[in-house]
Amino acid sequence: MPYEDLKGKIALITGAGKRTGIGYAIAEKLAACGSDVVIADLGGGPAEAGGVRLATGTEMDEIAAALAERHAVTALALPLDVTDRGSVADLAGRVKERFGRLDVLVNNAGAFFGVPSTIHQYDEEAWLKTIDVNLHGVFRVSQALVPLMTGGGSIINTSSRAGKFPPLFNGAYATAKAAVIMLTKVMAKELAGQGLRVNAICPGQIMTDLEKWRFEREAAFFQTTVEERIKEMCKTIPLGRIGRPAEVAELVAFLASSASSYMTGQAVNLTGGQLMEL
């Protein structure tokens, strides 16, 4: 659906700097609906870390230029480290200077470190870094950008199936994503009076670079192949396949638009039936 009411809105998506990621798919969808988009990601670091490809400033600029040309919108690429309060403040300042307001905030940036590992063997630094990116990052970015959402709007926080159903050997991520769901509910209650709706999405298995990296690590841990790990995972999914980033983007557009005008404080599953509990 095009969601006509998103035309002319200003949307910011964190963790949107890679074409293979969920954040990019969300930016693409919102731009296709006519929203001006801010693509926020690390951008300034190495192209790869620990076997996972990272967003680069060059790729972010290319994405912004392509979205602007393809959809006739304004697209701006800005560096952001969600673990750095100064970086978050700088982002908020640049958004205010360029647009003067914000209508849609998608807190999508996420990562996990130190996996696979059991809780009693988890490296403390990796644990804290995982919590900082996935939970505190949502808090920092929201705190800095909500003041720009004076005309109401929608905030969508990316949680995960892992926030409702505990995975093996990825406890920090699961704990952080569970906390994001509660943070979403708190924000929904506190911000409703300002005309802001706040919801979370809980994707299951979505084929991104990070998901591929996870399958590679699990294959090594269980001494099997990536193909076998994916095959085993698909057996747990009633629809029998891994999801696509574009399918997540469709849900985000719905939650950003007036089509979901009576929804707030919800954590919506997108798992191919792998998780059916609320």
Image (tube, rainbow, N blue to C red):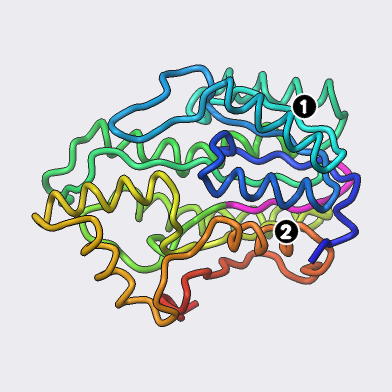
The type of residue carrying mark 1 is Val
Labelled disc at residue 223: none
Range shown magenta: 149-157
**Height in image: 52 above or below 205?**
above
Q: Position of residue 6 (x, y in %)?
A: 85, 53
**Looking at the image, which residue is at 70% across and 65% down?**
264
Q: Which residue is mark 2?
A: 253
Q: Which circle's residue, 2 or 1, is located before the other in the chain?
A: 1
Quadrant (top left, top right, bottom left, bottom right) of the N terminus:
bottom right
Q: Position of residue 212 (x, y in %)?
A: 34, 49
The foreground one among 55 and 174 is: 55
**Looking at the image, which residue is at 35% across and 55% down?**
174
The type of residue carrying mark 2 is Ala
**Height in image: 38 above or below 121?**
above
Q: Position of residue 102 (x, y in %)?
A: 81, 39
Residue 154 painted magenta: yes
Q: Is residue 200 left or right of residue 226?
A: right
The foreground one among 252 and 143 is: 252
Q: Is residue 61 left or right of residue 17?
A: right
Q: Position of residue 165 (x, y in %)?
A: 35, 68
Q: Secondary structure at mark 1?
A: helix
Q: Which residue is mark 1?
A: 95
- Whether residue 54 is visible to the viewer of this picture, yes or no, is yes
Q: Nearer the viewer, mark 2 or mark 1?
A: 2
**Looking at the image, which residue is at 47% across and 44% down?**
135
Quadrant of the rendered image containing residue 166: bottom left
How far apart are labels 2 and 1 at the CA level? 21 Å
